[in-house]
């Protein structure tokens, strides 16, 4: 190759390398088992007023959780148990991932008034938000935004993080080198990964997660909703060519791996231990899952059904549900063993509102904490509290139930 030809090829190679580097940075920050939490503290979690947490609540290595009630938790509580300890380990991994990414731009200390496209934005010192910040995914629902604050993150009263162009809160990450303070009535968006503490002041809302590694999470009349990504093209939730009800495996056929009482239930704290099991592939995806039609729907409860497809490793699962496609509530986590065929699972959800349409889907959770989502489905509760009669000889199987 001549020297002149080398000069022509080199810029192309550099552009290709840059494109590959950009593509690598576009991957979301993996939260592992911490994905299930709306709030996770290191030392304590304290609450004042009628806060609402839509997602699990935990603390580790501390054990103190106070202020619930008056706060409401639409999820499980884990105080330095195995679940919380694993989640904190996963937060550390996620924090280091976010902090270690090469920046695509350096931003000013105050983000207010800016419209940013996907990328990694770094500040060597603090980050502030005194007004509105707009994040534009430019039509790419999988676009990722990472913000790196060398020290603190502070928002002013009434400030907002707005998403346009298909951006999703689940793909926004704030890596904070010390502590974060979300100001009064701020509408904040994204997953906060703070080295020390996180404080949500009066009336602030968070569409994402408050995950503090070492310090406290302090709440005051807040709403925190664990964000989840909608399925995007290229990540189907059902394996083509293996639809539910394939001829030859009808429901009820002798030998079919239907669920037995107790299969779908799981005592809080027993869902961990899969990751890191000798011989397990920690980066494997969970088996595909299929949302089935709801049954036993009355005015304040319903049974959610689904299938977890065959694989060579055990999988956990749960159902997400709510009055919109953002869900916000979920059942306890169940587990199915590796199987040669699809396994039918279900969970009862309770405390529902009469005369209301609910959305739901099944979620599969693989050994490495990676998630697969079933299709969204709906059901509608009846208008009055009228329960069907139940035979005392056949009590209902209440697997993975949620009590509102």
Image (tube, grey):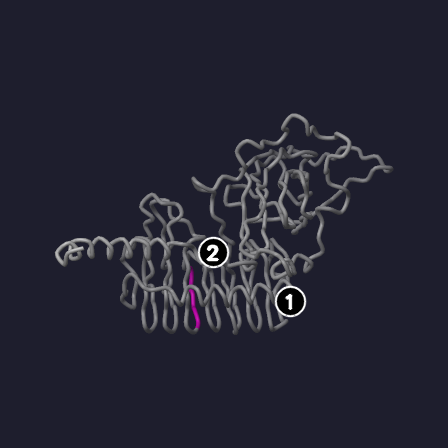
Instruction: Identify the magenta region.
Output: 179-185
Q: Residue 379 has which mark?
A: none
Against 110, residue 377 (above or below) is: above
Q: Earlier in the sequence, mark 1 or mark 2?
A: 1
Q: Nearer the viewer, residue 91 or 45?
A: 91
Q: Position of residue 95 (x, y in %)?
A: 46, 66
Q: Nearer the viewer, residue 150 or 153?
A: 150
Q: Position of residue 255 (x, y in %)?
A: 76, 34
In the displayed image of the protein, which residue is found farthest to the right? 393
- Give the spatial CA distance, label 1 vs label 2: 21 Å
| Crowd rating for badge 1 (residues with CA inside 10 Å; few <14, some 14–19, many 20+) | many
Residue in the image at 71% along x and 53% along y: 266
- Find out whether residue 378 is within the magenta segment: no
Residue 285 visible in rendering: yes
Quarter of the picture containing the N terminus is: bottom left
Q: Secondary structure at mark 1?
A: strand
Q: Report whether residue 53 is seen.
A: no
- Which residue position is annotated with label 2? 208
Residue lying at 12% horizontally and 56% vertically, measured from the top left: 4
Compared across the picture, whether 113 is left or right of 394 comes to left
What residue is shown at x 69% (from left), y 48% (from top)?
A: 337
Front position in the image: 4 or 359: 4
Tell me where residue 319 sits by quadrant. top right
Q: Secondary structure at mark 2?
A: strand
The correct choice, above or below, for 331 with respect to 307 in the image is below
Q: Residue furthest top?
A: 247
The circle on residue 79 is 1
Residue 246: x and y, percent?
63, 28
Determine whether, in the image, residue 9 is placed left or right of residue 333.
left
> Counting other residues with Cα less than 10 Å from the Cα at mark 2, is it few (<14), some (14-19), or many (20 or more)?
many
Q: Quadrant of residue 88?
A: bottom right
């Amino acid at each position: 190759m001549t020297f002149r030809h080398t000069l022509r090829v080199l810029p192309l190679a550099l552009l290709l390398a840059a494109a590959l580097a950009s593509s690598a940075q576009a991957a979301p920050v993996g939260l592992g088992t911490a994905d299930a939490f709306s709030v996770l503290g290191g030392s304590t979690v304290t609450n004042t007023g009628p806060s609402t947490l839509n997602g699990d609540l935990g603390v580790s290595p501390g054990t103190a959780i106070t202020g619930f009630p008056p706060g409401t938790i639409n999820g499980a509580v884990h105080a330095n148990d195995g679940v919380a300890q694993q989640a904190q380990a996963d937060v550390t991994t996620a924090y280091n991932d976010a902090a270690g990414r090469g920046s695509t731009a350096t931003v000013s200390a105050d983000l207010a008034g800016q419209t940013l496209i996907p990328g990694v934005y770094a500040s060597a010192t603090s980050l502030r938000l005194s007004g509105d910040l707009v994040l534009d995914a430019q039509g790419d629902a999988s676009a990722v935004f990472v913000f790196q604050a060398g020290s603190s993150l502070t928002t002013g009263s009434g400030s907002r993080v707005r998403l346009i162009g298909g951006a999703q809160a689940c793909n926004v990450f704030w890596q904070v080198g010390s502590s974060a303070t979300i100001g009064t009535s701020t509408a904040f968006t994204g997953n906060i990964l703070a080295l020390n503490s996180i404080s949500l002041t009066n009336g602030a809302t968070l569409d994402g997660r408050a995950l503090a590694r070492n310090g406290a999470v302090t709440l005051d009349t807040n709403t925190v909703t664990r964000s989840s990504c909608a399925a995007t093209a290229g990540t189907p939730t059902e394996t083509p060519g293996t639809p539910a009800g394939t001829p030859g495996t009808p429901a009820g056929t002798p030998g079919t791996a239907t669920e037995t009482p107790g299969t779908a239930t799981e005592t809080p704290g027993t869902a961990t231990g899969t990751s890191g099991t000798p011989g397990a592939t920690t980066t494997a995806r969970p088996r595909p899952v299929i949302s089935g039609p709801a049954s036993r729907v009355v005015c304040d409860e319903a049974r959610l059904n689904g299938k977890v497809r065959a694989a060579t490793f055990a999988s956990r699962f749960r159902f997400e549900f709510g009055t919109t496609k953002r869900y916000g509530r979920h059942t306890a986590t169940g587990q199915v063993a590796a199987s040669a065929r699809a396994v039918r699972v279900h969970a009862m959800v309770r405390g529902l509102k009469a005369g209301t349409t609910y959305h739901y889907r099944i979620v599969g959770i693989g050994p490495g904490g990676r998630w697969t989502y079933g299709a969204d489905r709906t059901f509608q509760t009846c208008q009055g509290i009228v329960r069907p009669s139940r035979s005392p000889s056949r009590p209902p199987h209440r697997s993975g139930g949620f009590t509102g």
